[in-house]
Image (cartoon, grey):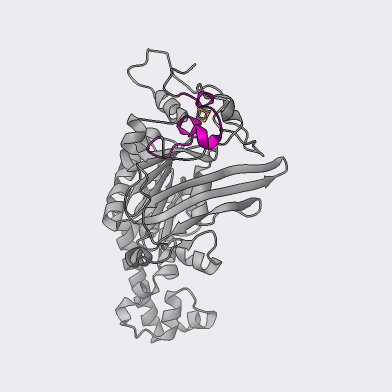
């Protein structure tokens, strides 16, 4: 199959960089099977920023980490579905995608940090406290950019240096670096690494990259650490950048600068971005399209404009109504009644039915599917389903045009 985007309304008509189809990620727990992600589907078009929003525990991060197979198995299990990924060459030549859940581990090691990179929520935890910044950013070049490191030798680097540039140097070779002429060659390699790491850090507008390279993570502020993570993530010019709540651990003023930086670098590198957040105002500023998640499933997908100005799913409507505004009377805060359901061995039903003001009997018996035929864009709600396909009378379906009870 080639990388052609679906023609569903609200979807971009462009080449796809990734397509998630019916992804199911379950966790085997003592109490039963936790359906953390249960039938999630969405596409990411080339060059777009897709926001994946939802409250804590709705499965956003599990979905994101599945792209890089970072879910510990066990207790986790990829119970179904696929994540197709089109690397740049496949997009340009109309070639076949790879299924990220099926590729051999050796191929996944090449994809991680190279074709798909991730910025984690807390840079303080993601960076190694025992290594200077230089070593941590240099690792990406040693792992994936051996040719860049050896550029200065024009293909004539001695074998030990070639091995050192790919981090495969053995003990003997490392010993040999102490003696001329290999000593001068290894110095040249170090200078090249310094150059590439310095450039990567400078791109994230870090002042004095040389000084930062020699620092340890605990010597840097939160914003600075996140810039280092961004430099590391973009060092190899990935096709897809996954940003998992990258500004949650930062204060508001730094948040704005980091967001701006991600946006600028995305344009410069022409990278697609999957932006995970629980913060609606934030995704509104940065995303082209938004997929709203609730309790392990996608509730609706649309352009940012559609989701904010014409939310179709009752959960999205509730979320937007809960955002404080000047229209609310003082002291009055809207909220969605009830709590998120238990996801251990759930029965078939709409997972929002215990909280939904429009719910009818069918909502508690049948899973709604993500369908764009009636709503004009993908929405998972029986209010947009066809009664014939469900085998019920039209009166049995929820009527979303009435006022909520
Ligand atoms: Fe779910 Fe029914 Fe409410 Fe739609 S109307 S969100 S299907 S409970």
Using the rendered image of the protein, determine whether residue 150 is visible from the camera's viewpoint: yes
State how many labels appear. 0
Q: Quadrant of the N terminus?
A: bottom left
In the rendered view, tell whether residue 382 sits above or below residue 200: above
Q: Nearer the viewer, residue 164 or 94?
A: 94
- Percent position of residue 322, x then y: 42, 24
Q: Quadrant of residue 344?
A: top right
What residue appears at the point 52 percent right and 55 percent down from the top-left corner?
Answer: 82
User: Residue 61, how many percent across, how many down?
Assistant: 50, 45
Would residue 386 be counted in the magenta stretch?
yes
Q: Is residue 55 left or right of residue 345?
A: left
Give the quarter of the image for residue 46. Answer: bottom left
Q: Residue at x 38, y 56 (%)?
A: 17
Query: Where residue 94 sits: x, y (%)?
Result: 36, 65
Hey, which residue is sitting farthest right in the picture?
Answer: 30
Relative placement, left or right, of 329 versus 368 is: left
Relative height, residue 74 to residue 135 (above, below): above
Is residue 188 within the magenta segment? Answer: no
Residue 358: give x, y in percent of width and height: 50, 23
Residue at image location 39% in from the left, 67% down from the top: 95
- The residue located at (45%, 77%) in the rendering is 164
- Name the one closer to the observer, 47 or 155: 47
Q: Main secondary structure of the magenta part?
A: loop
Q: Which residues are magenta?
A: 375-399
Q: Say if residue 71 shows up in the picture.
A: no
């Amino acid at each position: 199959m080639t990388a052609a985007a679906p023609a569903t309304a609200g979807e971009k008509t462009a080449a796809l960089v990734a397509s998630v189809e019916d992804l199911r990620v379950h966790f085997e727990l003592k109490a039963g099977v936790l359906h953390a992600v249960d039938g999630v589907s969405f596409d990411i078009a080339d060059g777009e920023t897709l926001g994946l929003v939802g409250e804590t525990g709705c499965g956003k991060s599990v979905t994101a980490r599945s792209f890089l197979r970072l879910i510990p198995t066990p207790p986790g299990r990829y119970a179904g579905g696929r994540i197709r990924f089109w690397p740049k060459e496949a997009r340009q030549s109309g070639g076949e995608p790879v299924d990220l859940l099926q590729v051999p581990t050796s191929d996944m090691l090449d994809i991680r940090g190279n074709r798909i990179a991730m910025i984690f929520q807390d840079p303080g935890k993601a960076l190694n406290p025992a290594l200077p910044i230089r070593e941590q950013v240099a690792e990406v070049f040693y792992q994936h950019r051996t040719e860049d490191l050896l550029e200065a030798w024009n293909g004539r680097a001695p074998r030990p240096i070639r091995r050192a540039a790919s981090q495969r140097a053995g003990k003997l070779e490392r010993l040999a670096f102490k003696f001329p002429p290999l000593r001068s060659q290894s110095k040249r390699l170090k200078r090249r690494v310094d150059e590439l790491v310095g450039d990567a850090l400078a791109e994230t507008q870090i002042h004095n990259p040389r000084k930062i390279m020699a620092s340890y993570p605990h010597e840097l502020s939160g914003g600075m650490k996140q810039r280092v993570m961004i430099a590391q993530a973009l060092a190899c010019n990935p096709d897809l950048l996954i940003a998992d709540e990258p500004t949650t651990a930062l204060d508001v003023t730094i948040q704005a600068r980091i967001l701006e930086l991600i946006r600028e670098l995305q344009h410069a590198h022409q990278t697609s971005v999957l932006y995970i957040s629980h913060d609606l105002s934030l995704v509104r500023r940065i995303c082209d399209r938004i997929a709203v998640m609730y309790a392990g499933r996608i509730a609706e997908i649309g352009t940012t404009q559609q989701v904010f100005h014409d939310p179709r799913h009752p959960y999205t409507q509730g979320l937007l109504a809960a955002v404080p505004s000047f229209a609310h009377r003082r002291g009055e805060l809207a909220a969605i009644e009830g709590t998120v359901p238990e996801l251990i061995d759930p029965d078939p039903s709409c997972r929002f039915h215990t909280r939904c003001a429009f719910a009818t009997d069918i909502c508690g018996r049948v899973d709604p599917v993500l369908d764009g035929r009636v709503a004009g864009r993908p929405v998972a709600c029986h209010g947009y389903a066809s009664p014939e396909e469900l085998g019920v009378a039209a009166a049995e379906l929820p009527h979303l045009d009435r006022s909520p009870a």
